[in-house]
Amino acid sequence: MYSMASALAPADRSVYTLSDTMSKNLSLKLRGDVFEQMERTVRRLKKPRNAYINEAVAHYNLLHRRRGLAAEFARESALARDESLRVLAEFEALPDELRE
């Protein structure tokens, strides 16, 4: 949840509101193979399951955020390309000789 206090916090996020630091409960169903692989990894890393899942979700969120930004960049780039080609065509239509 986004709060007005967090919107007014400095960019370095040195001020936190209660909603920024509170954990949220989540009921999660995993396929058996995914669960077993996660359990092996958690044991190998000696990391709490909750921390591992938090890191995995944060990583997945970042991945999709970057994919979204890449798609947005591609759309904007295509728009800029079309405009650049239009301007180039206008310049090419100008006479090549300069008047003195």
Image (spheres, rainbow, N blue to C red):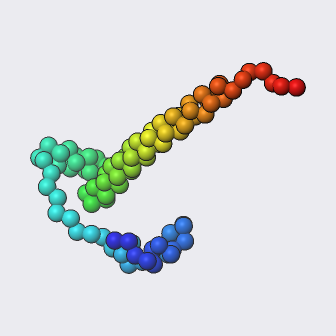
- Quadrant containing the C terminus is top right
> Hey, which quadrant is residue 70 in on the image?
top left
The count of marks equals 0
- Quadrant containing the N terminus is bottom left
Return the residue nearer the eye: 4 or 50: 4
Judge left or right: residue 94 versus residue 17: right
Residue furthest out toward the top: 97
Return the residue nearer the eye: 51 or 66: 66
Judge left or right: residue 100 versus residue 1: right
Residue furthest out toward the right: 100
Identify the residue shown where x is 22% and y is 68%: 25
Return the residue nearer the eye: 57 or 96: 96
Identify the residue shown where x is 30% and y is 70%: 23
**Residue 19: where, in percent of width, then height?**
36, 75
**Residue 29: where, in percent of width, then height?**
14, 55
Residue furthest out toward the front: 99
Identify the residue shown where x is 21% and y is 65%: 26
Return the residue nearer the eye: 76 or 27: 76
Q: Is residue 46 visible?
A: no
Identify the residue shown where x is 83% and y is 25%: 99
**Residue 68: where, in percent of width, then height?**
39, 46
